Image (cartoon, rainbow, N blue to C red):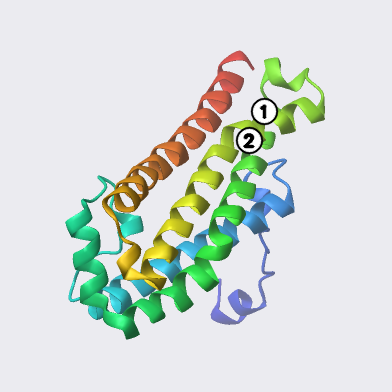
Amino acid sequence: MTLRSLARARIIRVRPEALVPGLRRSTVALCTASVMLFVVMSVLEFFYFQRLSGGLSSLDIRLMGFSSDDAVAWLTALGEPGREAVLVWQYSSFDLFFPAVFGLALVGLFLHVASRAPTLAQRSKRTQLAAGVLVVLPYVVVNYAQNLFIVQMLSDPSAASIWLTSATSVLVMAKFLLALAALAAIAFVFLRGRIRS
């Protein structure tokens, strides 16, 4: 085949939703938006926020939690300009939407696998939706609660009491566990559907 014929060859456009048969466009859009938000927040964290804090990682990405001294050290290292930057570029913008967008994407994925699982496929759409919300909602609620507590500390570092920092640390760890639990539930329903089909 010559270069000219290659140039004239028909370009086949692959739609993202065609990669996973039956996946709704809205779910694809939500998953794409979640990935994009996650990438932007990661870039901000590692190339901007950690420079402002002298290399200290933000509280909400510490999987193993943190102590009250860790929280105070992070707030002090940021200083007032750094705290304002994190408030504006993280909690007043991207992370204001990420938990909801990611949560809706997970619900969409749950509904997709539930519609193909023999047990759940026999249930009404309302029941499937309720099950999806119950699986995902705890993650969303905990994520927003964690954000509110961190915003409170960023706005007023003197509010970083032992109680507040301890509660925030527990919420941060719970956020990751609940996100993994939601993904595990989706994977479990998917695998059961594949085994029984």
Compare marks 1 and 2 and give the one earlier in the sequence: 2
Give the class, few, some or many, for how many residues have Cα within 10 Å of label 2's Cα (few <14, many ≥20): many
Q: Which mark is residue 131?
A: 1
Q: Disc 2 marks which amino acid?
A: Phe
Mark 1 in CB contact with mark 2 (< 8 angstroms): yes
182 or 64, nearer to the observer: 64
Q: Secondary structure at mark 1?
A: helix
Q: Nearer the viewer, mark 1 or mark 2?
A: 1
Residue 150 placement (x, y as % from top left) = 40, 61
Quadrant containing the N terminus is: bottom right
52 or 132, nearer to the observer: 52
Taking 126 as reference, is 30 above or below it? below
- At horizontal 58% and vertical 22% (from top left) the residue drawn is 194
Is residue 146 visible in the rendered structure shown here?
Answer: yes
Quadrant containing the C terminus is: top right
Taking 136 as reference, is 83 above or below it? below
Q: Is residue 153 left or right of residue 55?
A: right
